[in-house]
Image (cartoon, rainbow, N blue to C red):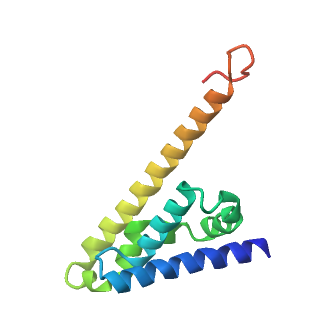
Amino acid sequence: MKSIMQIAGLFVIYHIGIFIHDLCRVPIPGSIIGMLLLFGLLSAKIVPVKWVSAGCGFLLRYMPLLFVPITVGVIEHPELFKGSGLLLLILTLLGTVLVMVTAGHTSAWLARRKEKKSCSSRNRCSQSL
């Protein structure tokens, strides 16, 4: 039940992003505006992470490509595939792989950095970094 409520909250933020996109007619997709809005709410601690963590974990586990902005942009603009669709498809796939690899390496680097900070001295730390 907790995950369902959190996903519903994320859905509301997504639709607020769509509303802002439609209202302001900005060239940024509404889904990206919603993600930026969520990021701002989390950064300002208006929305605590625990209010969205289970729902985000569920969505990220089963639908990771929907959260990659390049994929979202292509989905919202299918007219881009007219003419040179195969080239754009290849570039989109390469861009998606590049984003996923970069995000993975960044996450691993941040995890190592966090682990390194938790070790106050080499004597107490059982792993060498």
* Residue at the right extreme of this rendering: 1
Q: How many marks?
A: 0
Which of 40 and 56 lies nearest the eye of the viewer? 40
* Residue at the top extreme of this rendering: 123
Q: Residue at x 68, y 16 (%)?
A: 121
Q: Residue at x 57, y 59 (%)?
A: 42
Which of 70 and 114 lies nearest the eye of the viewer? 114
* Left or right: 9 in relation to 33: right
Q: Quadrant of residue 71?
A: bottom left
Q: In the rendering, at what x and y percent does residue 23 appear?
A: 36, 85
Please, is residue 39 above or below residue 75 in the view? above
Please, is residue 64 above or below residue 78 in the view? above
Q: Residue at x 41, y 67 (%)?
A: 69
The quadrant of the image that shows the C terminus is top right
* Left or right: 40 in relation to 58: left
The quadrant of the image that shows the N terminus is bottom right
Q: In the rendering, at what x and y percent does residue 92 appear?
A: 34, 68
Q: Quadrant of residue 12?
A: bottom right
Q: Residue at x 63, y 76 (%)?
A: 9
Q: In the rendering, at what x and y percent does residue 112 appear?
A: 59, 34
Q: Quadrant of residue 80?
A: bottom left
* Left or right: 80 in relation to 128: left
Which of 121 and 93 lies nearest the eye of the viewer? 121
Q: In the rendering, at what x and y percent does residue 95 appear?
A: 35, 61
